[in-house]
Image (cartoon, rainbow, N blue to C red):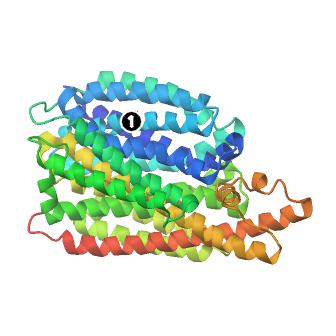
Amino acid sequence: MKNTNWTLYTCSGVCALIMLDTNVVAVSLPSIARSLNASFVDVEWVVSAYMLAFASFLLPAGSIADRLGRRRVMLFGLAVFALASLLCGLAWTPFVLNVARAVKGLGAALLLTSALAVIGHTFHAEKERARAWSVWGAAMGVAMTVAPLLGGLITSAINWRWIFYLNLPVVAILMWLVSRHVDESKDASNASFDPAGALLFSAGLFCIIWGLIDASVAGWSSRATLLRFAAGAALLVAFVLAERRQRAPMVDLSLFGRRVFVGAVLGMFGYAIAAQVMMTFLPLYLQNAFGFSAVLAGCAMLPFAVAMVVLSRLAPRAMRVLDDRGILVTGLLIVAVGNVATALAAGSLQYGLVAAGMVVTGAGAGLLNGTTQKAILACIPRERTGMGSGISTTTRFVGIVLAVGALGAVLAMRTAASFEKLAWLHGLKASPEMIGRIVAGNAADAFGQLPPAMQAVAQEAARHAFIDGFASVLYLAGGLAAVVAALVFVLARPLEKV
């Protein structure tokens, strides 16, 4: 039997690598846009291709981990992750980068579900489980803290490609630790891999995200957008029907008949769409509004990330006073207040006020980070921890990828509307391509054909337009967090304890 502390640290390190890779890219997006001459849609896909593949494959990945062995799947996932990181670093077009990011997302799904399943299987007594998820939450928080600063340093000192190359030695160390400190565990009798269900779920989610991301270009009422949404909805309905016929489905749909489980899942979803998604949009704001370099934007993200780490460590103490439902509701309400406060400060261009809002949002995220995972897995039988971790992480990353698509569309639309008003006053005409490059942080290329005197005017108009768009995103995210908090308060009030 391996030392359980080292098992916990190793699995937490594997999960932290995924969180690091998820967030380290955000601060380098403007540099990627300039280097590969990418539009905002291209930049969104840098985040969304990874998240979409990740979220789409989490459910089958959980079943694969249960069936084939969690340690074995973790090692294989690390190998896939390393190869995809190498291809990301070598990418010569946005398309190649996004394909490599999608492959990396598949490897990350295998990694995360197997690591979480090992933690859930190893630590099952109430006290040790609370400690384990607290350590896990702190590791995730540290990764989120380090990611923006690390991404900024690498992008500024070398270039964005080394963000991916540096994964290779980290993966090698983690493979060694997994081989030494993680016992094999599986549940082959209850696990099943359903290729048809996995394909239906992945295709349905892809169509919806595709519609969200491209709606700002194609139009929300266009035939292409409506067809993508309709196809996505139909495929997801087909997925539910297919799962109902399975003897051992990837998702035990009967769980959604329990209010406590639905409340826990909603808590995770609200955390993702209102808090975690800000790791993508805040670096864009800091660079577009303040003109920060990548490394300064990474440093400027620290108030959010540090507050998250601190509150992650304090969450177990809060559990002495509040149950999981209370912490979920409190955390979501704090996130709502933080988002609105940041929105109010965004237009002032006073970093201190913006940082104060980020601290509040980060504090709420810290309370939610480990608690959301714990609350969902507490509803799942121990022998199905692979499925449970699949449901939990699918909820988290589906929320992020939906929020990147939906809030990104709001950002693009509001920025476009504001810029068109400002541009009209100066005789400028805004095209969708120009707006895309403004939002992506590639304004220099967007205005490259204008006379030098007009370029300064256009860039100032673009900056104020982006600030308006970003504030709209924050108000919407804050409202969504408050709505989800109310739903969790009502639903997660069962006779049973979460």
On the image, the x and y values in percent for residue 178 come to: 33, 26
**Residue at the image position 55 percent from the left and 59 percent from the top:** 218
Amino acid type shown at disc 1:
Leu
What is the quadrant of the N terminus in the image? top left
Q: Secondary structure at mark 1?
A: helix
Q: Residue at image x 68%, y 52%?
A: 296
Is residue 330 positioned above or below 233 on the image? below
Residue at image coords 9%, 64%: 496
**Picture quarter containing residue 308?**
bottom left
Q: Relative to 246, is 471 above or below?
A: below
Q: Nearer the viewer, residue 436 or 70?
A: 436
Q: Nearer the viewer, residue 439 or 183?
A: 439
Going by the image, does 227 lie left or right of 1? Answer: right
What residue is rendered at 26% in x and 70% in y?
488
Q: Which residue is mark 1?
A: 106
Can residue 338 be seen by looking at this rendering?
no
Rendered location of residue 440, percent (x, y): 64, 54
